[in-house]
Amino acid sequence: MFRSIIAAAIATLLGLLGGCAPVAPPVESAGTARPVIAITVDDIPQHGGMAPGETRLDLSRRIVAALKTESIPAYGFINGARAEDADSISAVEHWAEAFPVGNHSWSHPNLNDVTADQYVAEIIANEPMLQRLSKGRDWRWFRYPFLAEGEDPEKRGAVRQVLAQRGYRIAAVTMDFSDWAYNDVYARCAAKGDEAAIAALEEDWLDAVRHSAKGSRAVAKGLYGRDVPYVLLTHIGSFDARMFPRMIALYREMGFDFVSLERAQAHPAYAADNDPRLEPRQPIWALMQAKGVPDPAPRAPKVDLATLCI
């Protein structure tokens, strides 16, 4: 799963770039031509384990505070089925007071594992909660769970048709460092009080952030000749809450500014996501072959997430 989600994000980026003929001016922030990122946060109100003493509401508060302190816009994607207790309900309500929320399906199924009708039912089941939480703000953005848009073309087309009929835009992912993989590991290490292991996790996280950003920029420049506005995938996890301030600082150190999801996806590269009636993007292999762009260099992890703190 770790590699498949990275591959999906790179595939999205390649598809966006290769499927867009005209070269549009870069989205600018504060009058500069610095590269920009839109931060999105998935699996609200809960993802993965937590360190001792934490609550789901704590995590929302800390991530929101990190974003608000830096005046950074963000967009959250909720799974209504995960608001199953008072703490989780408080967490999703807290997020929705601070930032807009969109549809991540009711219970986070993989489109490849269910029928199109079952998947559509998941989308619709989430809508009453979105309407209640949004209080007039735009909630008609959809993020595919697992970034799985459907291996079967007929099923993929059927879901896109429903998304179009219901007025959704698809939230793309063009930058991803698999933050989700750290949350359960951190919870284990925190429970054991293993500060050395936690320090190693922190170093690996920041290395993953740095490597992902460089890789996304290299792909964009190789295929498109310049940066596009990037859409970053993160999650509402325990380690995310710990690391968000340092993640933001690192992106700023690397020269990035931040914009809203809507502003990022106003770039013409995102046309097929903004209008699901359009044909989906081309396959990754075709774009890479046509443009002669090599795969981004793999990253050598500094820790083994599968065995740390076991």
Image: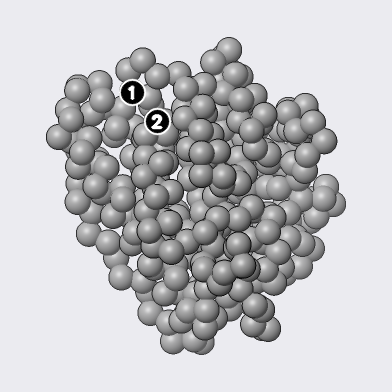
Residue 178 in the image: state x and y as whole percent: 40, 49
| Place of residue 200 in the rendered image (x, y in percent of width and height, measured from the top left) | 19, 42
Label 1: how many Cα within 10 Å (few below 14, some 14–19, many 20+):
some
Furthest residue toward left: 196
User: Does residue 273 appear anywhere in the picture?
Assistant: no
Give me the disc on residue 27. Answer: none
Q: Residues within 10 Å of mark 2 (few under 14, many from 20)?
A: many
Amino acid identity at mark 2: Ser
Residue 65 locus on image (x, y percent): 51, 33
Residue 9 vertical position relative to residue 268 in the rendered view, above or below: above
In the rendered image, the residue lying farthest to the right is: 165
Report the residue at 34% width, 32% height from top.
184
Q: Residue at x 25, y 41 (%)?
A: 201
Q: Residue furthest front?
A: 31
* Disc marking residue 51: 1
| Above or below, comparing residue 197 to residue 84 in the picture | below
Q: CA distance from mark 1 to mark 2?
A: 7 Å
